Image (cartoon, rainbow, N blue to C red):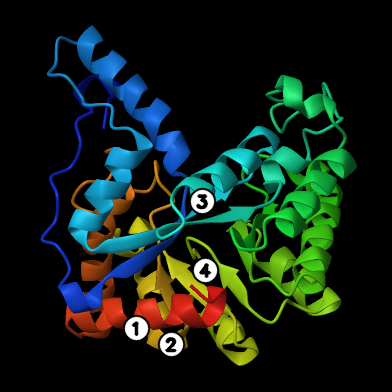
């Protein structure tokens, strides 16, 4: 779809989940939805399109509740966002939980000013990247220990060979291993970001020993990968991508691990489910993704919703 024709407005609210089938969005970046919507609104104005409301975090949480999303795990995975996620959890103790980590794409930026990216150009560098990875990662451990009631997971960590290129592979692997060790030390679940790195991620997990509760966030693997996850008792969290036409492998993976190892997430502001792919994502859109999951396993949406809720309780204790 060309930029010109892009629809910047919010997707309509879905049919709410039944009251006895509310769920948790186990991986989202609600703090990032606000500036994202502001940018959508700016673009809409530029094109003479209708206003796009810029909802506050509180409004986004209320919209989520109206859809049957009773809670979220907000993920802070850039150094300045760690505290943001924890603050949100402190302000909304009943509905917001935090996950913290240094994202694999961030891990390679810290203390490495000017390291060329895959295209040979300098990587995107922000002031907070002056801190070394060790310093940034120390903050993750410090906050997870200081806020044990708020921080329910270490994540997202893992490997991303899509943007970073082979040169950064060692740096990412070492960062991933540090997070694995921390999750085990604190006995916390770990959320994995795995983009074009299935083999690397699995090998690293098996070599070091995976945390007892290991979750592949926005799962993107195939049936073969799901068999490996099933064998090791790893969990898969499904985003809007489970609804995309070409992703039969993701839907097959859900059938392979079964509902007791499946969860649902938005990864907002990206990865909106069909038929609203490309729109701004937010936790209120979870029922669309649950609909796609329900189709994949041929069960009612409410049953799938309740199963993911049980799984979030088993994994995160929430
Ligand atoms: Zn994410």
Residue 273 seen in the figure = no
10 Å crowding of disc 2: few (<14), some (14-19), many (20+): some
Q: For marks 2 and 1, give the CA distance.
A: 6 Å
Q: For marks 2 and 4, give the CA distance.
A: 18 Å
Please name the residue that numbered disc 1 is placed on.
Answer: 307
Q: Is residue 292 left or right of residue 116?
A: left
Residue 260 seen in the figure = yes
**Is ligand 1 less than 8 Å from the beta carbon at label 4?**
no
Residue plotted at (26% across, 68% down): 290
Q: For marks 3 and 1, give the CA distance.
A: 24 Å
Element on which disc 2 rests:
helix
Please name the residue that numbered disc 3 is placed on.
Answer: 89
Please name the residue that numbered disc 2 is placed on.
Answer: 260
x and y percentages locating residue 194 in the rendered image: 61, 59
Q: Nearer the viewer, residue 14 or 256?
A: 14
The disc, 2 or 3, on the residue closer to the chain's N-terminal end is: 3
Q: Nearer the viewer, residue 91 or 31?
A: 91
Q: Mark 2–mark 1 contact, CB under 8 Å?
A: yes
């Amino acid at each position: 779809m060309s930029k010109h024709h892009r629809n910047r407005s919010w997707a309509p609210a879905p049919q709410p989940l039944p009251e006895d089938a509310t769920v948790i969005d186990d991986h989202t970046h609600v703090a990032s939805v606000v500036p994202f919507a502001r940018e959508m609104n700016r673009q809409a104005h530029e094109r003479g399109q209708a206003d796009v409301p810029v909802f506050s975090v509180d409004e986004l949480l209320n919209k989520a509740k109206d859809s049957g999303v009773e809670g979220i795990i907000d993920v802070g995975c850039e150094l300045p966002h760690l505290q943001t996620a924890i603050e949100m959890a402190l302000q909304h103790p009943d509905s917001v939980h935090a996950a913290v980590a240094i994202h694999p794409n961030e891990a390679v930026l810290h203390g490495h000013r000017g390291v060329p990216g895959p295209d040979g150009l300098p990587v995107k560098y922000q002031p907070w990247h002056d801190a070394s990875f060790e310093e940034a990662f120390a903050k993750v451990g410090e906050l997870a220990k200081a806020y044990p009631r708020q921080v329910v997971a270490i994540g997202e960590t893992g490997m991303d060979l899509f943007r970073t290129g082979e040169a950064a592979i060692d740096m990412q692997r070492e960062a991933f291993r540090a997070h694995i060790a921390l999750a085990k030390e604190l006995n916390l679940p770990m959320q994995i970001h795995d983009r074009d790195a299935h083999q690397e991620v699995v090998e690293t997990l098996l070599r070091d020993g995976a945390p007892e509760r290991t979750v592949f966030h926005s799962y993107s693997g195939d049936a073969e990968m799901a068999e490996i996850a099933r064998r090791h008792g790893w969990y898969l969290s499904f985003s809007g991508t489970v609804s995309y036409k070409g992703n039969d492998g993701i839907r097959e993976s859900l059938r392979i691990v079964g509902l007791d190892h499946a969860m649902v997430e938005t990864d907002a502001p990206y990865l909106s489910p069909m038929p609203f792919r490309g729109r701004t994502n937010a936790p209120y859109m979870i029922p669309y993704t649950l609909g796609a999951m329900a189709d994949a396993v041929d069960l009612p949406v409410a049953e799938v919703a309740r199963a993911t809720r049980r799984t979030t309780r088993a994994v995160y204790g929430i």
